Image: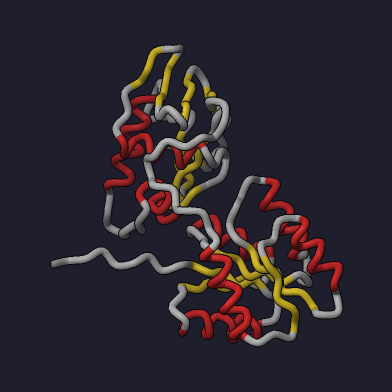
Amino acid sequence: MNTIPAKVDKIVVVDDDDRIRDLLGCYLEQAGFAVSVAEDAQALTRVMERESVDLIVLDVMMPGEDGLSVCRRLRAAGDKTPIIILAARSEDVDRIVGLEVGADDYVGKPFNPRELLARAQAVLRRRPPQEMPGAPTDDGAPLRFGPFEIDLSLRTLKKAGVEVPLTTGEFSMLKALVRHPRQPLTREKLAHMARGRGFERFDRSLDVQISRLRRLIEEDAANPRFIQTVWGVGYVFVPDGVGSSTNNAA
């Protein structure tokens, strides 16, 4: 009897010290996690654009945008990905501010990798139950774009007040897109959010589903206004229909 393999949690280690990145990357992988590493805030952004992330281990002192600013920015954007701050033991203010701006825990440097692993496991255990793709969610007021209104709590899409029928798969895909306006989503990340599973390289069903959605909501599916293609990346939802020269129909 075939069984579905358990999902492996994905951790991103963000630190400008390559020794710490390598140490934690190896240690966490040996503990059974999937791990990506990033040397700064920009590299973290690139990882999060292409992958679904379960936990961020984030150094405070980094060149460019520091860890506290990254944490504050993610929380202000509504990103609830758990974050563990790495802060120098002598800098109590960094640990306090980190928790105040939305970090879930902190570990002082220098640290024992076993302590970090224990804290990561504890933070992940405290996560709320994972939302099922396609399930209704209470996101407040309905979201509007063009003549459309989508109510994620009622699982309805209306055009000028008239309901547009959606399959569960179509709703899941549209829900993932409208929750991330103007944010390019890779096929891999979109598959995780809309289906709860990874994207296989030669699987064209995701693109077929995007085409179906375009036929439902676009005036001209060949020149989409709302669901645009970002070449070499994936798709982006543009609620006001203002695109750029890099976005076109697939």
Outermost residue toward the left? Answer: 1
Q: In this view, does 218 lie to the left or right of 244?
A: left
Q: Above or below — where is 211 with respect to 112? A: above
- Which one is in front, 64 or 78? 78
Say which residue appears at 44% left-offset and 30% top-offset.
224
Say which residue appears at 57% left-offset and 72% top-offset.
120
Quarter of the figure that contains the C terminus = top left
Image coords of residue 249 (percent x, y) = 41, 37
- Which one is in front, 226 or 14? 14
- Which one is in front, 206 or 56? 56
Q: In this view, does 136 lie to the left or right of 243?
A: left
Image coords of residue 193 (percent x, y) = 43, 49
Q: Can residue 77 be seen in this view?
A: yes
Image coords of residue 202 (percent x, y) = 27, 57
Q: How many labels does the image show?
A: 0
Quarter of the figure that contains the N terminus = bottom left
Q: In this view, does 12 lie to the left or right of 171?
A: right
Q: Can residue 250 be seen in this view?
A: no
Say which residue appears at 75% left-offset and 55% top-offset.
101
Q: Above or below — where is 44 with respect to 226? A: below
Q: Is residue 93 left or right of residue 24?
A: right
Say which residue appears at 53% left-offset and 72% top-offset.
121
Q: How is the image coloured?
A: secondary structure
Image coords of residue 55 (percent x, y) = 56, 65
Q: Above or below — where is 103 with respect to 221? A: below
